[in-house]
Image (cartoon, rainbow, N blue to C red):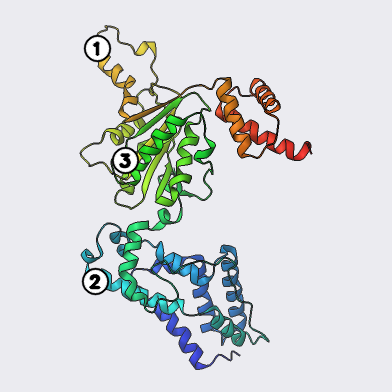
Amino acid sequence: MSALNSSAIAQIRYLQRQAASLLLYQSVLKSPAARAFLDLLQALHHSEVSGLDSQVAYGNWFKVQAEQNQSWKDSLIWEILKNENPFSRLAQQTDFASLPPALVEAARHDLEVLQNIYECSSEQLSKWVRVAGQLDAVPPIWHCETVVESADKPLHEKLEKWSGAAESLAEYYRKFGTGLFAEYRAFGWRGGQLASISHPDGINLKELVCCDWQRDALVKNTEFLLAGYPALHVLLYGSRGSGKSSLVKSLLNEFGSRNLRLIEVSKSDLQDLPLIVEKLRGVPQKFIIFVDDLSFEEDDDAFKSLKVVLEGNVTARSQNVVVYATSNRRHLIREFFDDRPRPRDGDEVHAWDTVQEKLSFSDRFGLTLTFEPADQNTYLTIVRHLAKLAGIQLAASDLDHRAKEWATRRNGRSGRSARQFVDFLKADLALFDK
């Protein structure tokens, strides 16, 4: 039989009632760590039936914390900071003083409740499990090895009353956003919804050479976006492997800490582009919608969707979104000789206007950056730069000779080929040329 006294049972029931009383932040307690915490309370509540259940529940709670390498308390605060609810969503768009009083009061109520739950320590839970399971010693307590500095956050352990932090929490939401956008920097549009990308490409601007003016123009335009000024949609076109996609992806690593986010949209999903833009409207982050290898076929619906985003319609343009697209084609819509107008009965009278609309579609991007094919000098310059960053110690003549052989036997001269060569050479030297 369980030896938990009436005082312990009363504390456990109080925590359960507190969890059930949340008005706005219910989803905070749906995270894996929070669910394991509630399951543990439930097992302790009924421990008079079997103390074994509380041991199993404690083990699961410990395992969740270990898998996340994060303590229960840090996990709870983080879930509050990124939680999406009526208060956090409206706080992103409205000054705190303009928020409905009832909404603010509900937020304060929930913060007080969550503080009560937060203050239930791992040490206390471990002691309850020892008693309920009639163990000889308390179970181990998870202590996260990484120390999370939270004093600069609106909620932290030293704050006396969380309910008094509603205004600073609203300001935090206004600055950093909520949900996936607060947690991740890169996304893909999959099956009609955003999917987070946990490990985006780590390429950075310093790795990119021989595209200085293109890089500077794109960085300047992105700075406009981050500063809240109207930024231009950008088309990057040129030969394959010339660094177009790498340049766009490097912006995320350069400016991700300044609330820049990148959403990759495939050509097959471009018809959803107006929907995506509307989802992003009003949130504090700035977004690059990245479309790689763009081109269109005849009567492609995606063409019309992209045109709406580039040129706008009755709906005002969202100032926190730009489209950066790459293409190997200057004219994005494929044109055949049969498309060119010849007088026939029933044909369009002003057919040349239609042709010109197709050919000039790329002009609808406010900024077009061209990437020329790499000649031998450009290719070798890129190789030398990447080799230096990789710490490869080879005589310049030897490096150049190997690089030329690689280009001849494999993918030709390009920035992509240079990177592949340096990656191969680094591994080859490390393993077989000691």
Say whether residue 166 is left or right of residue 389.
left
How far from the left and from the top, in percent, is residue 72? Answer: 52, 71
Please give the residue where the numbered disc 3 appears in the rendered image: 274
How far from the left and from the top, in percent, is residue 215? Answer: 44, 34
Please give the residue where the numbered disc 1 appears in the rendered image: 346
Residue type pointed to by label 3: Pro
The front one of 299 and 381 is: 381
How far from the left and from the top, in percent, is residue 116? Answer: 42, 79
Q: Residue at x 42, y 43 (%)?
A: 263
Q: Quadrant of the N terminus?
A: bottom right
Say if 4 sits above or below 17 in the image: below
Please give the residue where the numbered disc 2 appears in the rendered image: 102
Q: Residue at x 60, y 88 (%)?
A: 131
**Sequence order check: which comes first, mark 3 or mark 1?**
3
Say if 8 sits above or below 303 in the image: below
Asked where in the image residue 191 lies, by quadrant, the reply is top left
Around disc 2, counting alpha carbons within 10 Å, would you say few (fewer than 14), some (14 to 19), or many (20 or more)? few
The single residue placed furthest to the top in the displayed view is 343
